[in-house]
Amino acid sequence: MIYQLFGHFKKEIRCFKTLLLLFIGGFAHGQLSIQITQGVDNPIPIAIVPFQWTGAGLPSENVAEIVSQDLQQVGEFEPLSPRNMLALPNEESEVYYRDWSVLAQDYLLVGKIDYLADSGLMEVQYEFFDINRQQKLAGELLTGRESQLRDIGHEISNVVFEAVTGTPGAFTTQLLYIVAEFVSPELTYYRLEKSDYDGKRAQVLLESEEPIMSPNWAPNGLDIAYVSFETGLPRIYTQNIASGQRRQITNFPNINSSPVFSPDGSKLAMVLSKDGSPDIYVQDLISNQITRITDHPAIDTEPSWSKDGGSIVFMSDRSGQPQIYQMEVGANSYDVERLTYDCFQCSKAQFLPDGVNLVHVRRETRQSPQYQISIMNLETLRVISLTSTRLDESPSIAPNGSMIIYATKFNNRGVLDAVSIDGRVKFRLPSNQGDVREPSWSPFLN
């Protein structure tokens, strides 16, 4: 797994056929769909009443159902079936707390949707209640077009999730990932896709007969970086999602890989072997100046920034086996701190938002066949393994720090799984077409 990237560089250079699907409305070949594989033992009971609709026919999206699915999919809530509700209120004046206490519900969400014929807009009014305290926790009027109803539903889910848990919701975030579709021994299609956090509304951003790797979000949520082999060699590109405009960042000999935006979006950390062995470099995206960060004959790869942008963690095999190291940007190349000692192989490290806990992929012993997603506290050195399957890799953290999405295998197919940072909640995003790999969770999006 660790050296899979470098195997691509032995590939014979051949003519390429690259299909750029750079329109934002283009749908992906296959949709991802969440399957809950593990939830908490005692999920929070919540009643989400179907929203009243005042327009003709039915809207294209069921907002209440979107909220219900969001909250159920994270494993911490158990929505009440509308069939078991004693009443169907749509506003505060119609809410009687005793009706919901009898049903043992802790929270209640009601709402209505009005169609404004003059403007073609829709007004979504929702109100959220704590049944036990008998008080209203939140309420808002949101306006948008019918095509934005799914976004409005996700936004309501964010409000409900934060009101109950105290953690900002990440339901309006998105995912990048790679789909590899095997056609024949001579042909595999690679697609860079983007979707909502739950796999819905998937879109193809790039398609090629050559490998695409290492997608990464810019902190503004508007741009991405990735590696494409479309010229027969690995090169780093950035791309604006809305316009599809691309920029080739590197064209150095040999390895150009693992681009990662700095927290302020002004720089890219990357792996280059232009000066010999693979090392970590940082390129200023405005001046294009490149600075070498590490200088070692071993393989240094998989850079990831600290939350303040002052240091970089990376994987190196300088000790004989892949381990995780950290160094300050601008420090001398020999001033490197080794972070992991108690594993046979540790890789793919990145910090949780607290800056203290390090998510990584861990293989405990030489005899162990398992690569697991784990968290190590750098202050206490305590390690918690969150997964137990054999080939878990490429973890990416939700911007609220509550979930980790990663690539794994299920029924001999590459899929995306997600696990909460306490290991209690798990869900799966399988694809109905192709192997899915290398997920990247977006920042919070405006």
Image: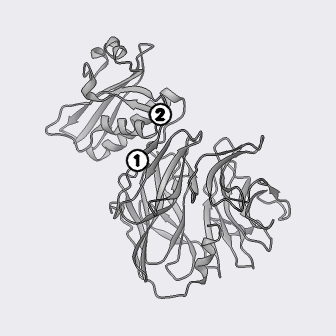
Q: Is residue 439 above or below residue 244?
A: above
Q: Amino acid at mark 2?
A: Glu
Quadrant the N terminus occupies: bottom right
Q: Amino acid at mark 1?
A: Gln
Say whether residue 388 is left or right of residue 22: right
- The residue at the point 44 percent across, 49 percent down is 197
Q: Secondary structure at mark 1?
A: strand
Asked which quadrant contains residue 233, the reply is bottom right
Residue identifier under label 1: 35
Query: Residue 437: x and y, percent?
Result: 50, 62
Q: Earlier in the sequence, mark 2 or mark 1?
A: 1
Q: Secondary structure at mark 2?
A: loop
Please tell me how crowded label 1 is: few (under 14), some (14-19), or many (20+) other residues with Cα within 10 Å.
some
| Disc 2 and disc 1 in contact, CB within 8 angstroms | no
Residue identifier under label 2: 76
Query: Residue 364: x and y, percent?
Result: 70, 55
User: How was this image coloured?
Assistant: one colour
